[in-house]
Amino acid sequence: MAKHWIPHKIIFALYGLEHQTDPDPFAPVRLIGYDGAAYRGQLTRTAQDKPRYPVITIILYFGSTRWNKPTHLYECLKIPKKLKPFVNDYKINLVEVAFLDDKLDYFHSDFRIIAEYFINKRKNIDYIPSPQEIRHVDEFLKLMQALEGDDRYEEVLHTLQKEEKKEGINMSEVLDRIENRGIIIGEKRGEKRGREKMAYEINTLYATLLKQNRMEDLKRAIADPDYQRQLLIAYGISSEED
């Protein structure tokens, strides 16, 4: 018997974003709103003559701990026993991405790479990404940026766009570029902090010499970096290690 395709709409709700790593205790209540809006949209005048389709809402939870909050509406409410038969229950479709260990083989799209990453992140083990090529690089990196709250993913995307590189990119290359970007950012921040510290030390030395009216030493310190260094150490403003 031939299978008939049934039109439907799937809504993905993402949980586990940066600043939202805890499971939502009111997820069933919120998802009723999503589904209700989708069904209500099928009742407009322009949609009246079109076939109605079922709506499927799936929560993709990226947290590293198990979802321990309600998955049914009944669990969110205090319902008197006499009223319970009249209250419709509502369950959520939950996918705990970081716990898909034994189901990875079911996926072959970019989602498999993302799931593999979060599984390894949860286990906190050495992560060796698969060589699988990322098919939708733009969307992939933007999603990773949102999930991890790490702007380096977006910076890698901009770099790839400048290089006009659209194919042959896998997770290993992405992470290598992110790590290199992190090193560069760290070096720049270190250099900035070093300059700020140096400026503070020199200004402190000059203020001390002015206060003590050692004008000749001040003039010499400005003109002679070696003498300036000697005074910084002598006054304990800086150390030889610095």
Image (tube, helix red, strand yellow):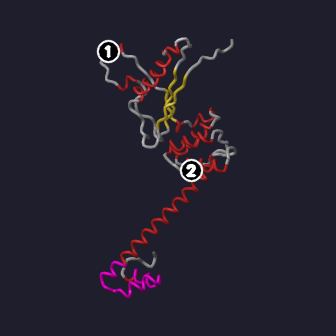
- Magenta span: chief secondary structure: helix
- Residue 169 image point, x, y percent: 66, 46
Span highlighted in magenta in the image: 206-232
Mark nearer the viewer, 2 or 1: 2
Residue at screen point 53% across, 15% down: 47
Question: Residue beneath label 2, please?
Answer: 155
Q: Tell me the crowding category of disc 2: few under 14, some 14 to 19, or many 20 or more residues within 10 angstroms, Cα based.
A: some
Marks counted in the figure total: 2
- Residue receiving disc 1: 83
Q: Is residue 102 above or below residue 181?
A: above
Residue under the image location 40 percent in, 32 percent down? 69
Q: Residue at x 50, y 14 (%)?
A: 45
Magenta segment: does it hold 210? Answer: yes
Mark 1: few, some, or many residues within 10 Å (few <14, many ≥20)?
few
Tag 1 or tag 2, which sits nearer the N-term? 1
- Residue 211 vertical placement versus 152 (above, below): below
For this view, does 239 lie left or right of residue 144?
left
164 magenta-colored = no
